[in-house]
Image (tube, helix red, strand yellow):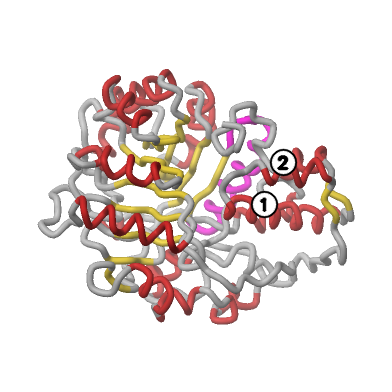
Amino acid sequence: MISLEATTTYRPALVSWNLTKKCNLSCPHCYLDAGEGEEDELSTDECFALIDEMLLLGTEMLILTGGEPLLRRDIYDIASYASGKGIWVVMGTNGVLVNEHVASKMVECGIKGVGISIDSVDPEKHNRFRGGPDAWKYSVRALKICRSHGLEVLVQSTIMKENRHEIPELLEFAREHGAWSLNVYFLVRTGRGTSMPELTPLETENSLRQLIEAQSDYEPMLVRSKCAPQFKQLSYEMGLGGMESGGCMAGTEYCRITPEGNVTPCPYMDVVAGNVREDGFTSVWETSRVLTELRDVKNLKGRCGACEFNELCGGCRCRAFSATGDYLAEDPACRYQPGTLKIKTPEHVVFTDTVLQRIERIPITFIQNKVRKGLMAYAASHNLQLITSEDMEKALAGSKRKRKFLSKAD
């Protein structure tokens, strides 16, 4: 088993915040079933108070999303308040409403990056899927406008049976548009997506292998999988980089807050751990039974419970819940049989001073920790006792990038 230092203190380092259910599109896979706004969405003052609480709990990165977050009139006030407190703010948007003025406001209020949804390189196919006649045109325009204003852009693509074959084209598209990262989300059947077919486990594995192999070809752009944490197990098996990516963080370093203040372990899981209005975010994070159960890998069942990768991967808790109603069940999308690789972890791994300095330049602690764990896993897979800068570049896809989106040198 890959041995990692036990985490004794859990904090919501990364929070995904659905600020509103309002949306100008009607995507069939929407986990929030967005469209009309909720009557009881958190007020501006409640949002400010919640940000103060996040800061005390150790939140480092905040994803402002929806619905469509740009439909909230106070979106720039909320973003400014969070960034002014030293939290890294990223916005997730469909991009349709982004113009020069909006991009300028994003920069002004301290937003570091913008995730824009592109689900097909075919405009008509994307438009049909997103439910907007010109959605593709405006989303692509948003990528260009945001880049011209110095914002890092992340292309977000949900992979399903209909577009799985487009992964190579999406990789090329993201690189051509200067994306910091291509984030590939594997459909979880929740919200409006309940009736949509997921990929088979074999299709999922083949797609993940495709992404893992593509990492070095698309540097310095990152290639990332979401809702498929077995990315790490496959990276290990293939002896390639990317083991700092993925791994289910639900309830350990990550959670979602809904427009009305419910806290769930992840956006794709509607199990409510508590409500920030009724209980306070601190109480929910520290005492919720749901979150507490997710923090101990010994609670995992089936193959996930027996797997030597469960500390690095953990399986997708949302997919387990969607398939079985039990968020501790094994991930049905993973094909790995525990014990197959017979991992031997090096007893002592030393990082050179240069490697340690590069890690320390990352301003977000939970990402530093992911990098350290990824390097340890890479050392295990290659039987290394010493990690050099050259090893780091092989282990961490995208480490050669010249831009410093996540660097203290900014």
Residue drawn at point x = 40 percent, y = 69 percent = 323
Please rate how many residues cluster around mark 2, counting C-alpha atoms within 10 Å: few if below 14, some from 14 to 19, many from 20. some
Query: Toward the viewer: 328 or 276?
Result: 276
Residue drawn at point x = 53 percent, y = 61 percent = 248
- Find residue 370 and report its horizontal and vertical position in percent: 63, 54
Cα separation between marks 1 and 2: 17 Å
Q: Which residues are magenta?
A: 200-222
User: Which tag, 1 or 2, sits closer to the chain's start?
Assistant: 1
Query: Toward the viewer: 386 or 332?
Result: 386
The quadrant of the picture occupied by the C terminus is top right
Query: Looking at the image, is 181 positioned above or below residue 206?
Result: above
- Find residue 202 and report its horizontal and vertical position in percent: 56, 56
Task: Give me the disc on residue 345.
Answer: none
Does 217 lie within the magenta span?
Answer: yes
Residue 334, picture quadrant: bottom right
Residue 102 appears in the figure: yes
Find disc 1 in the rendering and name its residue: 243
Residue drawn at point x = 73 percent, y = 72 percent = 339
Query: Looking at the image, is 333 positioned above or below residue 374?
Result: below
Task: Give me the disc on residue 358.
Answer: 2
Residue 192 appears in the figure: no
The quadrant of the picture occupied by the N terminus is bottom right
Query: Looking at the image, is 359 positioned above or below residue 336?
Result: above
